[in-house]
Image (spheres, grey):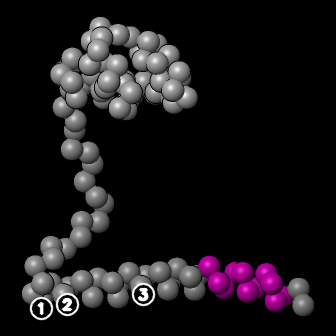
């Protein structure tokens, strides 16, 4: 990235191929995204605004370190543990049948 920034400081209208050639002379590799980021950092091009992305499926409870929030966290962890335990039991029954019935 520093090669791209240095090259763009010297020659602002340089193309990505020019920058890649300068980087290859120093035995480095410049990817197109690095060229674009360097241009954006130097203000040669405008940077696109990014979307905030998708929210998490399971929003974690707010950690305000009160007793109620700690209990809620522990309780939700216990519920997840019980759910996973039931799922493992359902998987284990057919596997045990297949393994031990041929005996």
Query: Where is residue 43 shown, x and y percent of the image?
Result: 18, 22
Real-space Cα separation, disc 2 to disc 1, in angstroms: 6 Å
Q: Which residue is painted at 37% across and 32% down in the image?
A: 1
Residue contact at pointers 2 and 1, CB within 8 angstroms = yes
Is residue 76 positioned above or below 44 on the image?
Answer: below
Based on the picture, tell me whether residue 3 belongs to the magenta stretch. no
Identify the residue shown where x is 57% and y is 86%.
89
Q: Position of residue 31 (x, y in %)?
A: 46, 27
- Relative side of 95 to 45, left or right: right
> What is the number of the mark on residue 82?
3
Q: Position of residue 70 (x, y in %)?
A: 18, 87
> In the image shown, does 39 or 102 lie closer to the viewer?
39
Name the residue beneath numbered marker 1. Answer: 67
Considering depth in this image, is 25 or 72 the residue closer to the camera? 25
Regarding mark 1 in the picture, which secondary structure is present there? Answer: helix
Q: Which residue carries the number 2 mark? A: 71
For marks 2 and 3 on the same chain, the one whose residue lies earlier in the sequence: 2
Magenta segment, which residues? 91-101
Q: Which residue is at a point 38% across and 81% down the rendered structure image? A: 80
* Disc 1: CA contacts within 10 A as few (<14), some (14-19) or many (>=20): few
Can you tell which of label 3 and label 1 is closer to the viewer?
A: 1
Nearer mark to the viewer, of 2 and 3: 2
- Determine if residue 14 is in view: yes
């Amino acid at each position: 990235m520093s090669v791209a920034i240095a090259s763009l400081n010297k020659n602002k209208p340089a193309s990505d191929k020019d920058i890649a050639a300068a980087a290859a002379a120093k035995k480095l590799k410049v990817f197109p995204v690095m060229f674009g980021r360097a241009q954006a950092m130097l203000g040669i091009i405008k940077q696109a605004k990014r979307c905030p992305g998708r929210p998490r499926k399971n929003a974690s409870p707010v950690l305000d370190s009160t007793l109620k929030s700690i209990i809620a966290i522990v309780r939700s962890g216990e519920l997840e543990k019980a759910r996973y335990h039931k799922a493992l039991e359902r998987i284990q029954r057919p596997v045990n049948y297949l393994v031990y019935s041929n005996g």
